[in-house]
């Protein structure tokens, strides 16, 4: 078991003919992901790495029965690409694209309210389930090991660092999800914590937050009320100055709110193992799995 | 992206936001000329810098005559304005806005902002205007009201009227207030702003609504479709190294410490700064070289870090996923030679081709300290920085 993606995932890649789309299609195929279609308007009939390309998501779903999508479409068309996939009822939509305007994402969220699709991202590394050899994203596959720890993070490389720490200690992962560094993202911590809580394979969760917004506080509330499995949390950015955007569009302390200290306190109060050392995540997880 | 108050007011004026009559001046003579053109009994001279708290910092002054306006402008232009929002270094004032004063009876707050919890834009408003809204939000959260906006429809006029009513406005003032709120929404919505506010939106003694102050912040990600807004950027207000970094496709934020950081990924870059602080060091910067990086970017990043002469040690923390550690190592060696780097480099390379990367650094003959883990690297970088001071 795992969450979000598994052996039955049939992936399409939107924006498959671009530089990133091509490169990562190859990487995902090599990892073992079943990619059944690509989408690139006007390039229907072509092939990328042996994957048939269609003009529209509609065609890709009809002809290749795709049930998940990975989006590399550049920022100006990013929101439109998400809505195209959601309108076709694609179950899982993972958007890698960085730099989609916040106002576009506010509209996307409204659009998706009465549609069944689940969005991960944008501005994220994607989702990976090692046991199913299913990688929907840009993360380096080789650092992952199949196992029982779920990883949820707003960051990319910090997630890889976390996964690397876990794998080196012999702790594998059930599913790892980068939820994205933007102020408005498809799926937040709470939904994913709930999925992990209900996933029999997952025995513990590593949660990597950062400054800005109150997603970590909401996650803490959920942990307090609903999580029986151990959660190890780190929040990046305690040295970030207020009012400055730290790389990610969503990583900003505004109006004095969204500091790392507040978020870590909330995690601690909720009973999570809250760390202020990013290099200690693996060891802390090892200990809490042994204790539980 | 931030703009000046006078620019925000000009954008508001285009869509009938009621703003005071005024003009911008870079010299006392120009300020005097603006006052003469405006005429009237009283004037206000306001420093134009991208920071709040200008009044308490001495950047806002009243004057009765055009001659006095020139005197006040002479005091403000060229001053280094230090407020809680500028940081200890302060900001040099280059321009002032000269306006007719308004006779204020009441100060309200209205603004538009993204509410990240409900993932919608909201109209926020309060009868406690003209003061620090962050403080009001902390001490009297019940005094700040919100009106969520459905993105499918935008702010509807009835919502603006409801807000005006809750602000205690009646009669013609209610209509004027609602109309000012709609105008502010038009600016916010049409420019993809992330914040637009009037603090205060004033009720004058002669029964008018006037946006005495205005502030707009734009979403950097949306600037590609608003070249007219991008053109409003004032490079003099930006940190020169941050501007250079943006041009080079790097994410860089200048800080006060002496330990330079070069990292791939925003989260890892923040975590690296945190780790440095855990060992008692002070980061000089946040720097994310980005995902699909190359040798040139690495070199440009090193150059920008070194342009800050506080930097005594550079900590390079790379997790190679798609980025190969060997490529980063080659970039570091090449740049260190070209730039004649005099400070020690502490490097932690992990992930794709880490061994190749480490051996390139080891055989380079440069003053490079390798580390297996990022905590080990942070500890040794902090020790080196201490030794250098």
Image (cartoon, rainbow, N blue to C red):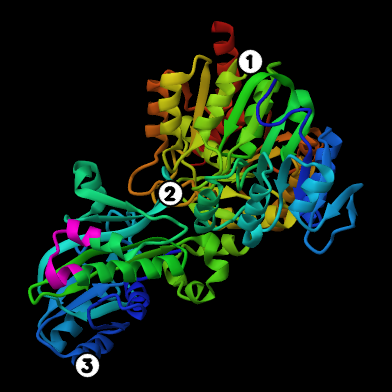
The numbered dot on residue B256 is 2
> Is B370 within the magenta?
no
Q: From the viewer's perspective, is B111 left or right of B228? A: left
| Upstream in sequence: badge 3 or badge 2 | 3
Q: Chain of mark 1?
A: A
Q: Position of residue B21 (x, y in %)?
A: 23, 83
Residues flagged by tags 1 and 3 on a common chain? no
Residue B330 visible in the current orientation: no
The magenta segment: B162-174
The numbered dot on residue B170 is none
Q: Secondary structure at mark 3?
A: helix
Please name the residue that numbered disc 1 is placed on.
A200
In the foreground, A239 or B202:
B202
Q: Residues within 10 Å of mark 2 (few under 14, many from 20)?
A: few
Q: Residues within 10 Å of mark 1 (few under 14, many from 20)?
A: few
Nearer to us: label 3 or label 2: 3
Depicted A110 relative to depicted A170: above or below:
below
């Amino acid at each position: 078991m795992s969450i979000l993606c598994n052996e039955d995932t049939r992936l399409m890649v939107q924006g498959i003919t671009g530089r990133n789309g091509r490169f990562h299609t190859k990487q995902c195929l090599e990892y073992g992901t079943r990619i059944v279609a690509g989408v690139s308007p006007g390039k229907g009939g072509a092939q990328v790495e042996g994957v048939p390309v269609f003009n529209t998501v509609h065609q890709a779903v009809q002809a290749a029965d795709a049930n998940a999508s990975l989006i590399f479409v550049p920022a100006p068309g990013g929101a439109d690409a998400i809505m195209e996939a959601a309108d076709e009822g694609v179950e899982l939509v993972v958007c890698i694209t960085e730099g989609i305007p916040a106002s576009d994402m506010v509209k996307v969220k409204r659009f998706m309210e009465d549609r069944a699709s689940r969005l991960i991202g944008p501005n994220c590394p994607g989702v990976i389930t090692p046991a199913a050899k299913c990688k929907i994203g840009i993360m380096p596959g080789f650092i992952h090991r199949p196992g029982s720890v779920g990883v949820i993070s707003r960051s990319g490389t910090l997630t890889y660092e976390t996964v690397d720490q876990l794998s080196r200690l012999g702790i594998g992962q059930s599913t790892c999800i980068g939820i994205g560094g933007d102020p408005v993202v498809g799926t937040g911590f709470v939904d994913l914590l709930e999925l992990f809580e209900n996933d029999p394979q997952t025995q513990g969760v590593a949660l990597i937050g950062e400054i800005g917004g109150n997603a970590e506080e909401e996650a803490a509330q959920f942990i307090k009320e609903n999580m029986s499995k151990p959660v190890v949390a780190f929040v990046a950015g305690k040295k970030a100055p207020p009012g400055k955007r730290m790389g990610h569009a969503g990583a900003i302390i505004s109006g004095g709110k969204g500091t790392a200290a507040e978020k870590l306190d909330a995690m601690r109060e909720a009973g999570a193992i809250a760390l202020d050392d990013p290099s200690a995540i693996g060891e802390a997880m090892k200990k809490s799995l042994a204790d539980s | 992206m931030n703009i000046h108050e006078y620019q925000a007011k000009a954008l508001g004026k285009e869509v009938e936001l009621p703003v005071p009559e005024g003009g911008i001046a870079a010299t006392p003579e120009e300020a005097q000329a603006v006052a003469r053109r405006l005429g009237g009994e009283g004037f206000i001279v306001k420093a134009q810098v991208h920071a709040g708290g200008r009044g308490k910092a001495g950047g806002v002054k009243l004057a009765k005559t055009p001659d006095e306006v020139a005197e006040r402008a002479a005091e403000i232009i060229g001053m280094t304005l230090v407020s809680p929002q500028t940081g200890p270094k302060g900001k040099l004032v280059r321009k002032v806005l000269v306006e007719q004063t308004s006779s204020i009876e009441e100060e309200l707050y209205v603004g538009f902002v993204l509410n990240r919890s409900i993932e919608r834009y909201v109209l926020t408003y309060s009868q406690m205007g003209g003061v620090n809204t962050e403080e009001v939000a902390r001490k009297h959260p019940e005094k700040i009201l919100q009106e969520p906006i459905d993105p499918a429809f935008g702010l509807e006029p009835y919502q603006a009227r409801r807000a005006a009513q809750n602000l205690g406005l009646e009669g013609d003032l209610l209509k004027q207030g609602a109309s000012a709120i709609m105008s502010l929404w038009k600016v916010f919505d049409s420019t993809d702003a992330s914040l637009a506010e009037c603090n205060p939106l004033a009720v004058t003694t002669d029964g008018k609504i006037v946006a005495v102050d205005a502030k707009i912040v734009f979403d950097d990600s949306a600037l590609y479709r608003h070249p007219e807004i991008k053109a409003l950027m004032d490079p003099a207000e930006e940190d020169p190294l941050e501007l250079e970094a943006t041009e080079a496709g790097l994410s860089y934020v200048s800080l006060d410490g002496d330990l330079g950081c070069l990292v791939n990924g925003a989260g890892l870059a923040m975590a690296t700064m945190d780790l440095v602080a855990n060992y008692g060091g002070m980061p000089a910067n946040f720097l994310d070289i980005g995902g699909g990086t190359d040798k040139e970017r690495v070199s440009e990043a090193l150059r920008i870090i070194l342009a800050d002469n506080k930097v005594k040690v550079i900590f390079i923390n790379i997790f190679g996923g798609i980025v190969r550690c060997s490529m980063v190592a080659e970039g570091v060696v090449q740049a260190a030679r070209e730039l004649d780097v005099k400070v020690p480099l502490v490097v932690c390379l992990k992930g794709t081709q880490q061994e190749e990367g480490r051996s390139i650094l080891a055989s380079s003959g440069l003053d490079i300290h390798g580390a297996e883990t990022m905590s080990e690297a942070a500890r040794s970088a902090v020790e080196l920085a201490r030794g250098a001071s």
